[in-house]
Image (spheres, coloured by chain):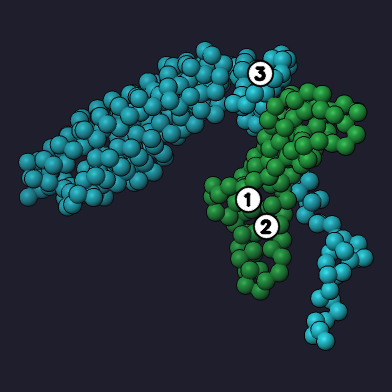
Amino acid sequence: MSKHSRKDGIEFEPHLADAAPQLDPSEAQAEDLLQREWQKSKLADHVEHNVWEEPTLAGELNAPPEADQLTYANWLTFELQRTSREKTWLVALLVIAACGPLGIIGALFGGISMGGGGIANLVQLLGAVIMGPITEEITKVLLALWIVEKRPYLFSSPFQIMLCAIAGGLAFAAIENLIYFNIYVPQHTAAFELFRWTVCVALHVSCSTLAGIGLSKIWQGAIQDLRRPRLADGIPWFYAAMSFHGLYNFPVIVAETLGWLQFLKE
Amino acid sequence: MIVTNTETVAGYHVAEIKGLVQGNTVRAKHVGRDFAASLKNIVGGELKGYTELLTESRRQAVERMMAQAQQLGANAVVNVRFTTSAVTAGAAELYAYGTAVTLTEA
């Protein structure tokens, strides 16, 4: 005699039972939400999902896209035509203005790569020579990089991009200096201030100029060929900026740790 | 548009293959829904916020796949498959793909 209750029988499985199946109420909610998102979405959102730039056989199996199809080239052409030069300058100025706040984040994340107390161990040395330069060089051009990658039509010349990169370097250097003077090395000498306002500012601006050249290369490739920006076009310049920064940090930190550079008041 | 996970559609034959079409999405709920779901997790039952999340993701991925098929001038997507990935925690990541075709009545 089975001890199973009546409802254990296979006939009560949902697909065999007589009861009407329940619809999922989240279907209607999802429909409403997606509809609202669709209405708010922009052409830039849709071009991300278009079929023509997919690396499939779609392009070969089908005739070339018609002129009114949403391809990346058509979208970029359309946006370039409707974006005024004044608007691109406004964007460039906004990017420059945002370099300060971004510089604070970058300087804090960049860590104490040039702290007054020198470096205590190998991990700190690697952080100062590798991680610090990588973080800082990315932060300095972060906003301009986003624009170049996502909305390249918002810049109208490599000059604007270079200005943004150089401003990023300057803002970063100034904020980093203030952090050093007031937080990391409050008991510093006048020579330290002179060193930071000359050598360190020159370093940051030089490195962000290198990164800016990389950004310009990415932007030019996209605008000239009306294709998606390729990060690879700028990578050698980004590496150059990071390497230059790291190569500078290494001897300075070693000299500081060994006491050859003395920036603390006696 | 006919969207099916079979290779063929009864009553039709494939006149033209347009190519692979796909749609993907990575969606999350806001922190409030995540918190509510974590509380519900203690007592059990359906985590409705996450059910919604999966439903939204599935529908969006399918819509994007269909939009690609439409761009190719297809009237059906056959052999549709779904897959998930793990890009980030707390998000629903769905990828739908299939073959865009032109079907004509047999």
Residue drawn at point x = 24 percent, y = 35 percent: A246
Of B51 and B1, the residue lying toward us = B1
- Circle 1 chain: B
Identify residue for label 2: B50
* Labels 2 and 3 share a subunit: no
- The C terminus of chain B lies in quadrant: top right
- Dot 2: chain letter: B
Which numbered disc flags the more N-terminal residue, 2 or 1? 2
Q: Is residue A36 left or right of residue A253?
A: right
Is B87 in front, or is A216?
B87
The secondary structure type at the circle numbered 3 is helix
Where is residue A153? Give x, y as percent. 56, 20
Q: Secondary structure at mark 2?
A: helix
Q: Which mark is residue B92?
A: 1
> Can you tell which of label 1 and label 3 is closer to the viewer?
3
Chain in cyan on the image: A
Q: Is residue A106 above or below residue A145?
A: below
Instruction: Look at the picture and state if A108 lies above or below B102.
Output: below
The reply to the same-chain question for discs 1 and 3 is no
Q: What residue do we see at 43% from left, 29% from top?
A: A96
Q: Position of residue B85 (x, y in %)?
A: 58, 47
Residue of label 3: A60
CB atoms at circles 2 and 1 under 8 Å apart? yes
Q: Are marks 2 and 3 in contact (CB under 8 Å)?
A: no
Using the rendered image of the protein, determine whether residue A43 is visible from the camera's viewpoint: no
